[in-house]
């Protein structure tokens, strides 16, 4: 059969793949996307968007209850049926026709089916053959990791997909894991009235500053969640009545109507034909800062699949760089792959922003104190109690939160910032800009925070650091 030719073939039509293709098309190339599920990918239908829809009602109620005058008007709890209807609207009833229309409008071709590499610049999709003139970009993302625990594979527990796509909210839920998905889903289901138990081998959110996990743990307990931290699981079973039974190594059992496994991610590269080009099936794909797979000048891996940063917004950032550099290389144009260049995903290394939509919220960008010290950076740490900021007292009656700045003393710039407290997500981008722009601390004195806002913590950090002479 004859091959259909395009300048660029993109495998995976999630937000990452869409952005790679769009940037390449804007750069003058032809592009086709191959997708085996829904155009829009994990984020649109099973992760970012539906999870935030499930969390929003509980967060809004908590905010209202913390404001005298609004608190008195709150007479009930979360209307779960209404939340699920809103979730369905957000995911368009798992109908991707709107996303397909966007592809058509952007001039990107779509092939539905399972793609496998069959050689250099060649992709097979069922009975069709595609050939790339310039590049193939693998944007297949990641899937939930099922740990090697006896009985787990046969017990049929939820992954994040089943949790965000829930139709019937269970009376009780046991969550295995202590990361972002575990914390957010525990928060959401607790707001629905579900009795939630969390089992984690470590402290919560251990990739962030330690005080974040401590505050989030306290918030979950206040919401009625039963936390078991520092525990190990020896077995998982599904009882005859459908109940999930989790046996811990100390012999104790946790029982719940349903269970969720949220212990990490694995790359979706198992059945991708990687062996045809000398790569290992099921492995993460190692790339340079232009997102090109090392040793393959035509192959790119963008988003979760390269294991640099498993966040949608960071994957889209990579995609913009990758689409642009694919177009530049195809045209024989200049490539700017120096740090912070147009074709380099430099922020992946030390300027990654992340928000956890827990209660309280957690937001961080850049390095933690421990990471900065491990990198050999001479640091000074500035901690501030957010409840002491004037804006916090007007925001909520019992506002509680913490903000930490990590300063590189040698260069006089911020290299990390962490916030935990009500609605701190909206404070994060200012810190991201300061870190990426390497804004000198001395210049930040001229960035005046509005009064009274919680962002006035920036002034408190500066006062603790000391005004330049």
Image: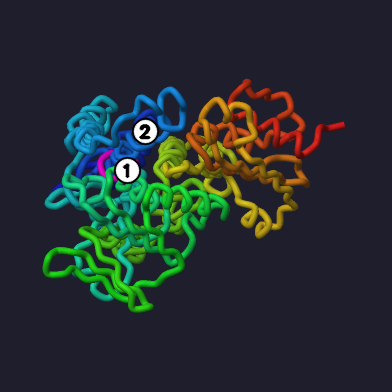
Quadrant of the image occupied by residue 176 = bottom left
Mark 2 neighbour density, 10 Å: few (under 14) some (14–19) many (20 or more) = some
Residue 56 higher or lower than 231, as above or below: above
Q: Nearer the viewer, residue 255 or 382?
A: 255
Q: Secondary structure at mark 1?
A: helix
The residue tagged 1 is: 191
Q: What is the tally of numbered marks visible in this picture?
A: 2
Residue 21 appears in the figure: no
Dominant secondary-structure state across the stretch colored magenta: helix
Which residues make up the magenta segment? 43-48
Which residue is drawn at the image coordinates 68% and 23% (left, top)?
Answer: 448
The percent coordinates of residue 300 (x first, y second) are 40, 49
The residue tagged 2 is: 61
Magenta includes 371? Answer: no
Mark 1 neighbour density, 10 Å: few (under 14) some (14–19) many (20 or more) = many
Which residue is drawn at the image coordinates 38% and 78% (left, top)?
Answer: 250
Distance in Å between CA atoms under marks 1 and 2: 9 Å
Tell me, yes or no, whether the two marked residues, 1 and 2, touch with CB atoms within 8 Å: yes
Which residue is drawn at the image coordinates 26% and 50% (left, top)?
Answer: 163
- Relative to residue 330, is residue 277 drawn left or right? left
């Amino acid at each position: 059969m004859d091959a259909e030719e395009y300048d660029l073939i993109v495998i995976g039509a999630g937000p990452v793949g869409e952005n790679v293709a769009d940037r390449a098309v804007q750069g003058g190339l032809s592009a086709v996307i191959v997708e085996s599920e829904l155009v829009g990918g994990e984020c649109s239908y099973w992760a970012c968007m539906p999870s935030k829809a499930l969390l929003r009602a509980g967060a809004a109620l908590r905010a209202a209850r913390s404001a005298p005058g609004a608190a008195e008007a709150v007479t009930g709890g979360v209307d779960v049926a209404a939340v699920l209807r809103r979730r369905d609207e957000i995911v368009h009833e798992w109908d991707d026709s709107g996303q397909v229309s966007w592809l058509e409008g952007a001039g990107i071709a779509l092939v539905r089916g399972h793609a496998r590499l069959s050689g250099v610049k060649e992709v097979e999709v069922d009975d069709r053959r595609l050939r790339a003139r310039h590049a193939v970009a693998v944007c297949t993302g990641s899937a939930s990791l099922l740990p090697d625990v006896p009985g787990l594979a046969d017990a049929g527990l939820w992954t994040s997909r089943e949790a965000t796509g829930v139709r019937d909210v269970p009376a009780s839920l046991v969550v295995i894991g202590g990361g972002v998905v575990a914390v957010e889903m525990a928060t959401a289901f607790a707001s629905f009235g579900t009795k939630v138990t969390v089992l984690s081998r470590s402290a919560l959110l251990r990739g962030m500053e330690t005080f974040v996990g401590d505050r989030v743990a306290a918030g979950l307990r206040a919401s009625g969640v039963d936390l078991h931290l520092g525990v190990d699981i020896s077995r998982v079973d599904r009882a005859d009545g459908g109940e999930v039974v989790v046996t811990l190594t100390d012999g104790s059992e946790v029982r719940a109507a349903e269970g969720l496994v949220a212990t990490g991610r694995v790359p979706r590269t198992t059945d991708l034909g990687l062996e045809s080009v000398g790569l290992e099936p099921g492995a993460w794909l190692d790339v340079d800062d232009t997102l090109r797979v090392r040793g393959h000048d035509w192959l790119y891996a963008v988003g979760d699949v390269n294991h640099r940063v498993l966040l949608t917004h960071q994957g889209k950032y990579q995609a913009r760089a990758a689409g642009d550099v694919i177009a530049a290389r195809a045209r024989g144009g200049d490539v700017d792959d120096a740090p912070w260049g147009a074709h380099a995903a430099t922020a992946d290394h030390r300027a990654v922003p992340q928000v956890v939509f827990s209660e309280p919220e957690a937001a961080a960008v850049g390095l933690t104190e421990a990471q900065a010290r491990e990198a050999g950076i001479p640091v000074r740490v500035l901690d501030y109690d957010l409840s002491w900021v004037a804006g916090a007292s007007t925001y909520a009656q019992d506002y509680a939160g913490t903000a930490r700045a990590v300063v590189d003393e040698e260069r006089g710039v911020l290299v990390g910032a962490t916030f935990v407290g009500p609605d701190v997500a909206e404070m994060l981008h200012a810190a991201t800009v300061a870190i990426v722009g390497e804004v000198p601390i001395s210049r930040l004195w001229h960035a005046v925070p509005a009064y009274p806002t919680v962002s006035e913590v920036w002034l408190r950090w500066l006062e603790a650091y000391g005004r330049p002479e």
